[in-house]
């Protein structure tokens, strides 16, 4: 004889049904928004920092540019040391 399956018994009368299942949608949306804001904040900070750094670096380079041609005395004293050998600049 085959085994018979029965439906579960109904809840007893007079008891209220259990609470509805909670949804985690709000928490998930909040976490995603917080992560996006942190990424935007980090990108903004990096953009500001590297823009500031590049501006300062450019100002340093401009300040150290030569302002004129060397005079004859300076030209004679210009020497280049390469691999321990001394080279002088050619005279014009």
Image: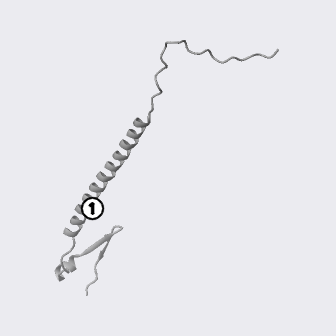
User: What's the colour scheme?
Assistant: one colour
Between 56 and 86, the residue placed more toward the observer is 56
Residue at 34 percent across and 50 percent down: it is 40
Task: Report the residue marked by disc 1.
Answer: 54
* Residue placed furthest toward the right: 1
Residue at 45 percent across and 32 percent down: it is 23
* Residue placed furthest toward the front: 13
Residue at 20 percent across and 74 percent down: it is 66
Percent coordinates x, y for residue 67 in the rendering: 18, 76
Percent coordinates x, y for residue 55 in the rendering: 24, 63
Between 71 and 82, the residue placed more toward the observer is 71
Percent coordinates x, y for residue 9 in the rendering: 61, 14
Residue at 47 percent across and 26 percent down: it is 20
Quarter of the figure with the C terminus: bottom left
Number of marks in the image? Answer: 1
Q: In the displayed structure, does residue 4 sit left or right of residue 46?
A: right
Between 29 and 15, the residue placed more toward the observer is 15
Q: Is residue 53 above or below residue 79?
A: above
Q: Is residue 82 above or below residue 89?
A: above
Q: In the displayed structure, does residue 16 sit left or right of residue 51?
A: right
Quarter of the figure with the N terminus: top right
Q: Secondary structure at mark 1?
A: helix
**Callout 1: few (<14), some (14-19), or many (20+) C-alpha neighbours within 10 Å?**
few
């Amino acid at each position: 004889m085959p085994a018979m399956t029965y439906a579960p018994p109904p809840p007893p009368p007079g008891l209220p049904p259990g609470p509805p299942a909670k949804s985690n949608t709000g928490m998930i949306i909040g976490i995603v928004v917080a992560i996006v804001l942190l990424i935007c904040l980090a990108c903004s900070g990096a953009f500001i920092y590297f823009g500031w750094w590049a501006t300062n670096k450019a100002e340093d380079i401009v300040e150290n540019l030569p302002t004129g041609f060397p005079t004859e005395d300076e030209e004679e004293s210009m020497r280049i040391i390469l691999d321990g050998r001394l080279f002088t600049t050619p005279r014009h």
